[in-house]
Image (spheres, helix red, strand yellow):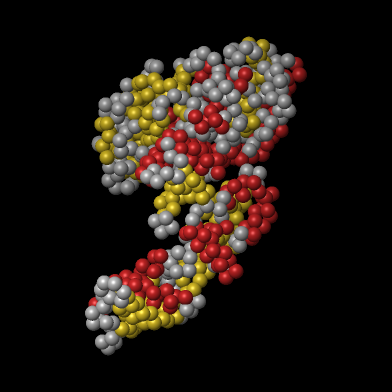
Amino acid sequence: MKEFTSGDIRNFAIVGHGASGKTMLCEAMLSCAGEINRMGSIEDKNTVSDYHHDEHERQISIHSSPLHLEWMNKKFNIIDTPGYLDFIGEAISSLAVVDMAVVLLHSVNGIEVGTEQVWSFASKNNIPKVLVINGLDRENTKFDDILKQAKDHFGKNVFPMQLPVNAGPGFNQIVDVLRSELITYNTDGSGKYAESDLPDEWKSRVEELHQELIEYVAESDDTLLEKFFEQGNLSEEEMRSGIHDAIQNQNFIPLFCTSAGINIGITRLMEFISKYGSSPVDRGTVMAKSTKSDEEISVNLDGDEPVVYVFKTISEAHVGDLSFFRVYSGSVSAGVDMLNTSRSKSERFGQMFLLNGKNRMSVNRLNAGDIGAVVKLKDTHTSNTLCSQKFRVIMDTVLLPNSNIHMGIIPKAKGDEEKLAVGLSTLHEEDPTFIYYVDPELHQTVISGQGELHLQVSIQRLQRRFGIDIDTFKPRIPFRETIKGKGESKYRHKKQSGGAGQFAEVWMRIEPKERGEGVEFVSSLVGQNVDRVFVPSVEKGVQSACVDGILAGYRVVDLKVDFYDGKQHPVDSKDIAFQIAGKGAFKDAFNNAQPCLLEPIMDVEVRVPEDFMGDVMGDVSSRRGKIMGMETEGSFQVIKAKIPQSELYHYSTAIRSLTGGRGLHSESFSHYEYLPRELQKRFINESQKDDNE
């Protein structure tokens, strides 16, 4: 492929709710541009962008796939993104590096929760959006209803650039508002079309819309506004720069009609993107931080020094290890030395590629604004910045949503722990929303993701790619043990049978401390009953008991221990004897001091449409939660609550089912508080059962 200047590149992500037809739209675009001879299909598992095993198995997109093609002397860098919320991290990372979002709407279902999510992230990144109602060959399509819904959700400036003439089975005719003409597509799937005059019944509606379009366009440019007042009309040529500007500042949001599965409407959409769509020049400056001063600094498209941002890493058997990147300044070539400012490591760029799914095309150089892949760099990870030694900056990392669904995993075979560690690290590298944590306190490995499907797919990938058989379990909650009252004990440890004897006697008092103050050990020994040399031994025994737990195997916190007296033997008293006696005395004193469990309480924010407020608040109460407040955020309500962690297992699944998939939540640790006495026995029994297993 020839080299393109920044102004001739179109970087866009195709986003939307699951099953709106994103992958097939990509397939149709590749077919129109001659990159593929014939379109594949989801059912036949032969589309270009869904090439992974798990995508074939589930017949959904799971990974974002960069694609490229040439159309009307412009280079399209397209990223096909997953639509299911479990894989939203892929769409967010993609939206961070493109210049435009093509948002697909299902022609029957209209705006769904995934649509709202991607719209919100595109708006946060301040990139223009184009809407496409796709699948207009389906039964029961609702073009006018969905157009109204889009205006209600996204603003009155959503504007239909096209209208479907014969939506439903056999769909092949579209009215073009910009050119006031009828487009009739061939039904052979070639994407070719013929233009003709408008039928009489469409003329008045199109004239009205055409006038409205001219007004939108003129608003974005004063000279056009003057021309419009003088002439009362504008030609398509006069409107060209105005349409581009109006899209950039979102004066209007164009909406198109397509049916990707049968390649209807795609060529005209591609023509529009090539003529009026965003190029890297439209976002010619991005902000980064200087590594020297931490000050904000401009990274300019026309800068001499290269600046590259890595937005995704993959490691696949048939593709190898690749880092996907965008060039924000300068140009990069194979063999060039770069500095990874995120990790202070130098890197040499290896072979570079343009990708269409698993097909790779080697390139020697990529210029500012372009997107490509490089053979995996040894010390570079997702969200890292690479630049020249002369111009050192770090670009902001992409903020991804918290992973709020958790599962414990353990390898079935002994000795697979190392394989598991490598596998978990690789999966996190490829998908930063997949988190894992090895908890040494509770001896468990916990994985976290965006939803149950996300965790299932991740476990299957671990099993398939790394050959590890895995068992899953509900993770143990990190309860804490403490006391509500004072207690004391006198404990004697004596061992005379066989070998050297052991003797120690420890007298101990304990009392509660404020939450968060930890365990304080003091010695108030007087007289000569116990040699001071044994004080550290008693403390060691107490600390060991605190780590192991007494009631249910959880860490002991927030109490004061006073070793105030005891007895020793001139021969048999030694370090180990006082450690054992210290541990025994502490356990007895603890059990005499109203022992209890503390449970972790989480700060939870639930974002739901207003209709579901009552259901969600009722559910929070049923989980022993306390509502702390509410806020309005657009058409959503944000409920803030404190809920015990033990009540939040698979909470994201519950929220989705309560809200028809439209609710989202985030959670973070708040504090510990007393577990109600009636629940204490249940959790102690569960813990002992886990230990026995």
Is 195 on the left-hand or right-hand side of 313?
right
Q: Nearer the viewer, residue 499 or 157?
A: 499
Split into 4 quadrants, where in the image is the N terminus? top left
Q: Which residue lies at the image location 69% right of the left edge and 25% below the top edge?
A: 138
Is 323 on the left-hand or right-hand side of 453?
left
Q: Is residue 243 above or below residue 152?
A: above
Question: Which residue appears farthest toward the front when viewing the image?
Answer: 498
Question: Which residue appears farthest toward the right when viewing the image?
Answer: 201
- Residue 44: where, in percent of width, then height? 57, 22
- Residue 70: where, in percent of width, then height? 46, 18
Q: Give the total of numbered labels.
A: 0
Q: Which residue lies at the image location 50% right of the left edge and 16% below the top edge?
A: 36
Q: Which residue lies at the image location 43% right of the left edge and 39% below the top edge?
A: 468
Q: Is residue 614 above or below residue 151?
A: below
- Residue 166: where, in percent of width, then height? 72, 20
Q: On the image, which quarter does residue 225 sit in? A: top right
Q: Is residue 532 above or below residue 115?
A: below
Q: Which residue lies at the image location 24% right of the left edge and 77% below the top edge?
A: 533
**From this viewpoint, is residue 402 visible?**
no
- Residue 254: where, in percent of width, then height? 59, 29
Q: Nearer the viewer, residue 28 or 630?
A: 28
**From this viewpoint, is residue 363 visible?**
yes
